[in-house]
Image: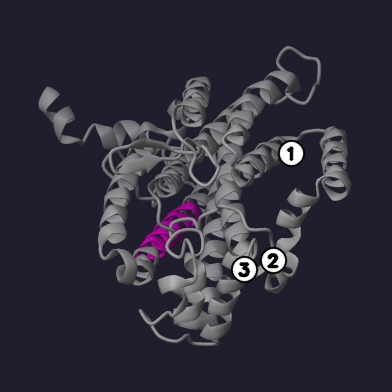
Amino acid sequence: MKIPARSYSIRNTQPEEKDVSLEVWQAVRSLLVITAVLIAFGLTMLYSASYGTAGLKYFSNQLIWIGLGFAAGCTAFLAGYKRIASKSLWWMGISFILLLIACFCFKPINGATRWIRFGGFSIQPSEFAKIAVAVFAAKYCSDHIRTFSMFWHKKGLLPLAAVSGAVIGAILMGKDLGTTLLVGSMTFATMLAAGLYLRYLIFPGIIGVLIALYIKFFDAMRLARVTSFLNPESVQQGKGYQLWNSLLALGSGNWFGVGFMTSRLKAKYLPEAHTDFILAIVGEELGFIAMAAVILLYSLYGYFALKISLRASSRLGMLLGFALTFGIVVQAGINLAVVSGSAPTKGMPAPFISYGGSNLIACMIATGLLLSIAFETIDPEYTERITAKLPWKRKRH
């Protein structure tokens, strides 16, 4: 398919190509609007959730992270997903090293070693490891589509499981169980989308059942932590304190909320009100209607991102788009489930909304890669056309 050199117009394409291009363009515009709305809404709610206790500190920091995330997303878009995927093993190696540095070279925070700190800022390598694992799994499966599901083949399941398992294991070493499960499920979902034999799910299923049985009968302390969300009122002064106050915030919001900036729970009662539990403040101040709107926005993000993935011009683009979409949407679902008491409490931020640079930058990189997949579907040479117009490129000519 040929696109005019100075335009991305679809007027001169063939009928079938025109329909696909138009559909992808509509998905791109919608995805950009939804992402911008989520970021703007998150910034607004962050101001409300943190102003009374921290002033403009978190708000100002988040503005910096948004700028860095925008730059990172644009870099991913201009580089192109194929070029980034060609270095997938490098990204996995860098992620593995950063995870080990966080685990062994920095003191734990709340019992977890997830962060690398410098000055007043910190980064969470596991957030970027999610992108690296998604890129690696999609690249490996697309390159070895005929052999990756063969267990003993030299280009089969074992190399994929070994490399991915090393990074996932490093995430687990930092005591980040929630991200470990998310990245593991992303990897399995990508392999299933590529055609993994279902029989390979039997062994992980058996392991999961055995772990659950062990916790139930031999690890009462861990069982209490996992099941405390089922009855948070009984442990509201202990393990269920955060969830209980989150439910109080959601319940007091009713349909339209108590009013912007007027939350009572954010001041003294709800820990992490600006990070993992910011949606509880949304429910309290803006009510059920706002929460339903947030759920709708996440659903639409997943819908349009999946549409871009399914229209990708390559198997790599389809698998990578699916993996990235799965990661963001499932993370949003987990955060909503935790805040509403439908799942055990885990440190899982709301994508694009919660305070935190690492997650925000990772989500914007994922969006940049999704846009790269979309543009490559319309014009395979888009990176050359765009980069040729950059100021420093013009000077060379």
Q: Are marks 1 and 3 in contact (CB under 8 Å)?
A: no
Point out residue 302 in the picture as x, y percentages from the top left corner.
Answer: 56, 57
Instruction: Identify the residue under disc 3.
Output: 237
Q: Secondary structure at mark 1?
A: helix
Q: CA distance from mark 2 to mark 1?
A: 26 Å
Residue span colored magenta: 23-40
Point out residue 27 in the picture as x, y percentages from the top left corner.
Answer: 48, 57
Q: Are marks 2 and 3 in contact (CB under 8 Å)?
A: no
Front one among 340 and 363:
340
Query: In this rendering, is residue 372 above or below 155?
Result: below
Instruction: Identify the residue under disc 2.
Output: 342
Asked if residue 271 shows in the view, the reply is yes
Q: Is residue 371 magenta?
A: no
Q: Is residue 38 magenta?
A: yes
Query: In this rendering, is residue 387 above or below 339?
Result: above
Where residue 292 sits, quadrant-wise, is: bottom right
Q: Nearer the viewer, mark 2 or mark 3?
A: 3
The residue type indicated by label 1 comes to: Leu
Instruction: Identify the residue under disc 1.
Output: 192
Q: Secondary structure at mark 2?
A: loop
Asked if residue 397 shows in the view, the reply is no
Q: Earlier in the sequence, mark 1 or mark 3?
A: 1
Where residue 372 sits, quadrant-wise, is: top left
Q: Residues within 10 Å of mark 3 (few under 14, many from 20)?
A: few
| Rendered residue at 72%/72% (across/down) | 234
| Rendered residue at 81%/15% (across/down) | 152
Q: Earlier in the sequence, mark 2 or mark 3?
A: 3
